[in-house]
Amino acid sequence: MNDANDAPELIPVVAAVIRRGDRYLVGRRPDDKRHGGLWEFPGGKVHEGEDLLTAADRELEEELAMRAVAAGAILLSASDAGASFVIHFVEIEAQGEPEAHEHSALGWFTPAELTKLPLAPADARFVATLDGSGRSQDSSLPSRR
């Protein structure tokens, strides 16, 4: 018998939505990873005891040599079909210039340009919610530092 209690627990993932002007930062996943070759917003799993800002800061440091200094609201939460992840797309204010430590390429793209990229499925769902103006829905970014 399979009830709600038997459902696998979803693993939270933070996707950092970093915007500079009207452009968003995305990276191309390495070919040997899940969704290899597809573009994504940077981030990763949220470890136990971490909030989304702390997880984003750790992931951005590892992947891009950047620092997350503030987080806005969750703009979208999306499941990743075929995996037990729930991806939280969070507006992140980040400092530094990105370096590709994990991704095979990095780029800054407008919402219109993002729609033309081969995106990971959850990232494509998020990009479909952008209004094309480069403006995010929540501009209040409380700082932790």
Image (tube, helix red, strand yellow):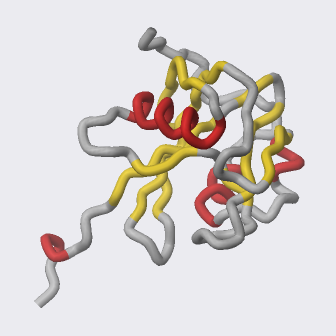
At which x and y percent is residue 83?
A: 44, 72
Residue 52, position as x, y percentages in the image: 41, 35
Residue at point 72%, 29% (across, down): 19
Pick whichever, 37 or 135, lies toward us: 37
Left-right relation of 16 to 83: right
Quadrant of the image occupied by residue 86: bottom left
Res 61 seen here: yes
Residue 122, by quadrant, is: bottom right
Vertical order, 37 against 126 (above or below): below
**Relative vertical location of residue 138 with respect to residue 81 in this rendering, above or below:** above
Percent x, y of residue 107: 83, 43
Q: Which residue lies furthest to the bottom in this view?
A: 1
Residue in the picture at 64% in, 58% down: 125
Let me know if residue 128 appears in the view: no
Q: In the rendered view, tell whether residue 80 sits above or below residue 137.
A: below
Residue under the point 41% across and 30% down = 54
Q: Residue 11's x, y, as percent?
A: 34, 58
Q: Residue at x 44, y 29 (%)?
A: 53
Furthest residue toward top: 145
27 relative to 71, above or below: below
Which quarter of the image is occupied by the N terminus?
A: bottom left
In this rendering, the count of numbered labels is 0
In this view, the residue in front, 128 or 40, is 40
User: For the C terminus, which image quadrant?
Assistant: top left
Q: Which of 4 and 89 is in front in this view?
A: 89
